[in-house]
Image (cartoon, rainbow, N blue to C red):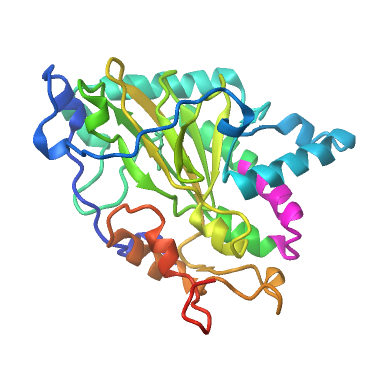
């Protein structure tokens, strides 16, 4: 199927907040003010307020370390929906190159940038470079390995279906959050969960701002140097029949420094379907989500505004009492 022929819907035209930020405003223009946001908890550096760290080298070690790391990975996916991946074998030289190119891209004059940007009525911009191509291929390799291990943890029988559903399509989002004179009055990216199977986030310029919602509290993520921050997306929650949960997250802004990040989404291809893996649906664990074509799923998604996990909730199967599973 030619994916370009499928019209998924239109996203709102994105205003160039980077240009606005150049005006050295001392207060936020009213249209960007978002009062009454839940504040984050103050992190005490304890393990209960830090996203788990998973070591890829251990996961692939094929000795006793592998089993304990697999258990850690399973725990991270069940309890957090987020983890940081270290020793992922993507070369730091390549990562530095991608970071540098991203920073250079955002420094380009607006007219130059527009050439690479989102076209009217489209959900995607475009752009590539040798480093980006290589980065994209490396991340496909990392996500392939991690997904296989997650499938093993979940005891999914047919890992082919899993691969098609979660790895069919890769997309990247380059996020730029300008410094803001009143950071508590605005949000960089509103609370949402991702449509993807997995998302791999790279913080570009050492400014942190990602927060995740755990036990109804917002927890700031302190990323480790060169680590990837990986999260479970909605498609994986559906595939795992609710065992691994996608987690709401948001991006905050900094009062003094701009922040940049690159999110790589490993998502299902448009000609497939999304639904719980058949081997996970049993009389004891009935399907929690409807099966739906990816195109129909995306059309519904793009017609809504970012609002936590509300769209995923609409996919839930209601039980006989009218409650969702
Ligand atoms: O920039 C971040 O920290 C989060 C990015 C994100 O959530 C997204 O691109 O969907």
Residue 309: x percent and y percent? 41, 56
Asked if 79 appears above or below 155 in the picture, the reply is above
Tell me if I can see residue 51 in this picture. Answer: no
Which residue is more in the foreground, 264 or 250?
Answer: 250
Which residue is more in the foreground, 191 or 238?
Answer: 191
Residue 9: x percent and y percent? 27, 61
Which residue is more in the foreground, 43 or 170?
Answer: 43
Residue most toward the right? Answer: 63
Which residue is more in the foreground, 156 or 307?
Answer: 307
Residue at 45 percent of width and 66 percent of height: 294
Q: In which quarter of the image is ligand 1?
A: top left
Assign the magenta stretch its main secondary structure.
helix
Quarter holding the N terminus is bottom left
Give the quarter of the image for residue 162: bottom right
- Left or right side of 4 for 281: right
Quarter holding the C terminus is bottom right
Residue at 64 percent of width and 68 percent of height: 277
Residue at 44 percent of width and 47 percent of height: 248
Verify whether residue 298 appears in magenta: no
Residue range in magenta is 143-159
Residue at 73 percent of width and 48 percent of height: 149
Residue 138: x percent and y percent? 59, 35
């Amino acid at each position: 199927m030619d994916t370009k022929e499928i019209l998924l819907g239109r996203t709102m035209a994105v205003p160039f907040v980077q240009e606005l930020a150049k005006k050295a405003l001392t207060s936020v223009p009213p249209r960007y003010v978002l009062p009454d946001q839940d504040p984050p908890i103050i992190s005490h550096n304890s393990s209960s307020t830090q996203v788990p760290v998973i070591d890829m080298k251990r996961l692939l070690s094929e000795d006793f370390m592998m089993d304990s790391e697999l258990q850690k990975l399973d725990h991270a996916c069940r309890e957090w929906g987020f983890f940081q991946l270290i020793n992922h074998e993507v070369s730091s030289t390549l990562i530095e190159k991608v970071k540098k190119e991203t920073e250079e891209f955002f420094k380009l004059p607006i007219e130059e940038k527009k050439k690479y940007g989102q076209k009217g009525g489209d959900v995607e911009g475009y752009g590539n470079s040798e480093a980006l191509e290589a980065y994209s291929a490396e991340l496909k390799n990392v996500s392939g390995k991690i997904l296989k291990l997650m499938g093993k943890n979940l005891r999914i029988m047919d890992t082919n279906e899993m691969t098609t559903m979660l790895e069919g399509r890769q997309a990247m989002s380059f996020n730029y959050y300008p410094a803001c004179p009143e950071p508590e009055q605005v949000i960089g990216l509103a609370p949402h969960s991702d449509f993807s199977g997995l998302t791999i986030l790279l913080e570009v310029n050492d400014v942190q701002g990602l927060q995740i919602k755990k036990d109804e509290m917002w927890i700031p993520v302190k990323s480790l140097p060169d680590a990837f921050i990986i999260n479970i997306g909605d498609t994986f929650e559906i595939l795992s029949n609710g065992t691994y949960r996608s987690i709401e997250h948001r991006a905050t802004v900094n009062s003094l420094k701009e922040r940049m990040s690159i999110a790589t989404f490993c998502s299902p291809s448009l000609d497939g379907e999304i639904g719980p893996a058949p081997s996970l649906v049993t009389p004891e664990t009935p399907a929690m989500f409807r099966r739906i074509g990816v195109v129909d799923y995306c059309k519904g998604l793009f017609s809504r505004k970012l609002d936590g996990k509300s769209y995923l909730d609409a996919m839930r199967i209601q039980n006989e009492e009218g409650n969702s599973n």
